[in-house]
Image (cartoon, rainbow, N blue to C red):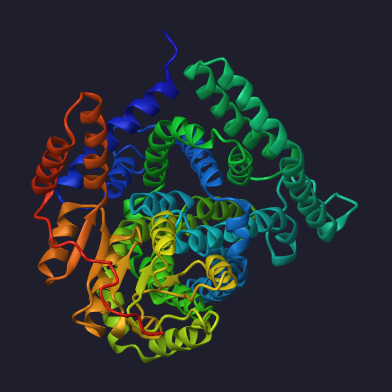
Amino acid sequence: MPHEPTLIATIAIGLSLAFVGGLIARRLRLPTIVGYLLAGVLIGPFTPGIVADQAIASELAEVGVILLMFGVGIHFSVADLLSVRRIAIPGALGWIGVATLLGALVGVALGWGPAGGVVLGLAISVGSTVVLLRTLGERSELDSPQGKVAVGWLIVEDLFTVVVLVLLPTLAPLAGGLILPDSETAASPLGPLGELLLALGKIVLFALLMVVVGMRVVPALLAVVARERSRELFTLAVLAVALGIAYLAFAVFGVSFALGAFLAGVVVSESDMSHQAAADALPLQDAFAVLFFVSIGMLVDPAFLLANPLAILAVAAIVIVAKPLAVFALVSLAGYPSRVALTVAAGLAQIGEFSFILATLGISVGLLPADGLQLVVAGSILSITLNPLLFRALEPIGGRLARSNRLARRVERRVASQEALPGPPGREPVRGHAIICGYGRVGRLITSALDRRGFPYFVITDDRREVDRLRAAGVPALYGDAANPALLEHAHVATARVVVVATREPHAARLIAERARSANPRVPLVVRTHSEREASYLRAAGEGIQPIHSELELAVQMSRYTLRRFGVSSAEVELIAQGLRDRGGRRAPTVDLRPNRPLDH
């Protein structure tokens, strides 16, 4: 009898049912993740019919986590992580403490005792890397301030979880738990504290090796492979670096796969071929991420869900209600705009892979009953399913919050008053100036054009480093959310010649335009957009609003260049370019930036 291809069967069944479930969920206008989770329930051991190999599915899901964290490391530099350390470290540790206390209360109420409740609280305090990165990636917010804060916060949670995984087997006997058969901690002459310090030392040693050696060796290796001009070999090198370093971190240094893969990505980011490396890993990353959600669904016991609705609701309330409220409060009090705080709060309102690892370890050391894992899995499914709905509610919640929440308004006003420091007295424009909202690549080019003609302007950005740099150069710059009416007032929107909304986030751009028009109904606006739908909305908002559809303008410029290569005359090229704009959307009047009236200083 031929050997059953368990691995192939698990991949084939998992991906096939995930495809069907995702398609149905999409047709029902539900998140595709819901379809993936239900596919896992159908092939899990608790439902009749096809049963896939759960152990293999979990290992495949681990590959997805490795590739995902590798991608995060490529796009999230060490400087970015350090830039959010003041909110990520105290915020994450503060929330873990709150979640542990709430989990302990639930555990005691269920009769598990304080130790079981503490393990439950620790498990539900850690967000899912997979869910957060997929959500931020779909919203193009990984490189935004809220994306950096959320990912930094999650990395701190992951690092803390690594410490807990090392310490839990050591402390379990002291809390009435069991000694693991393969645990060397009890017999170690170092004792619990010594074992913990040894584990932390290994993590620090691995990180130092990656920074000192890896940042020189890995980029050089990729450069050598790239010279061979073999796409296949380069892709293989990228996967070997991601998976090889992750395994080395786990096998030699006792570091989690996820953390090892993240540091591997940070090392690759030092290469000028990092973008190609990220693109090569993306297809496998997406496929294995789907298997991750399927593996979660396989852990669900529907009978337990039906028998314990109150306990499940209690865990879900901690994750979906208590955590967003706590995160929003902490991020807001740290001085971030409410829009950033809301996005971070929504992004972290879920639990995932590390939660299951902690719960499983808690069961193996005798601190958490078997039902604890079901409770964590149920809370994970509910939070992952509802997470996209939280993001959809961000815009209406943000608008209502700005109008009615006194605490949020006070925080934003306090931040605005602290940060709205003018530049040198001779350069501060108070009339006839431009207000540049957003200071990324687009914003920098616009200010460069204004500088060439000596036109005055204010810059509003939520990048603190850019604010400091601009002020040092004598440019009036404000730190915070440009949609904050207090900041617009400090930028003298009432006497501005034009407001340029250069932010890449469509919801933020719309809100800034609305607030600027509310403060000065006659001020012209130039707004960056990414879709014709958004451009149409802005055109309908009133006269004097010029939406710039970035993809359309890119197509126009590329068409101009292409037609000129064919010898088309300049007049005909401009006529065709105008036709492209007319096809892409009705063109609004162009804002005149020429100084047709004196500038008052």
Above or below residue 10? Residue 139 is below
Query: Which image quadrant: the C terminus?
Result: bottom left
Residue 79 image-quadrant placement: bottom right
Front in this rendered view, residue 153 or 269:
269
The answer to whether residue 534 of the structure is visible from this angle is yes
Q: Nearer the viewer, residue 595 or 287?
A: 595
Q: Quadrant of the N terminus?
A: top left
Residue 431 picture location, percent across and down: 35, 83
In the picture provided, is 349 more to the left or to the right than 474? left
Query: In the rendering, at what x and y percent does residue 256 appear?
Result: 63, 45
Q: In percent of the image, x 48 and y 42: which residue is there?
A: 68
Q: Is residue 24 left or right of residue 136?
A: left
- Place residue 311 in its image quadrant: bottom left
In front of the other: 338 or 529: 529
Pinpoint residue 5: horizontal percent, then vertical percent: 42, 18
Q: Is residue 317 visible?
A: no
Residue 190 in the image: x percent, y percent? 88, 54
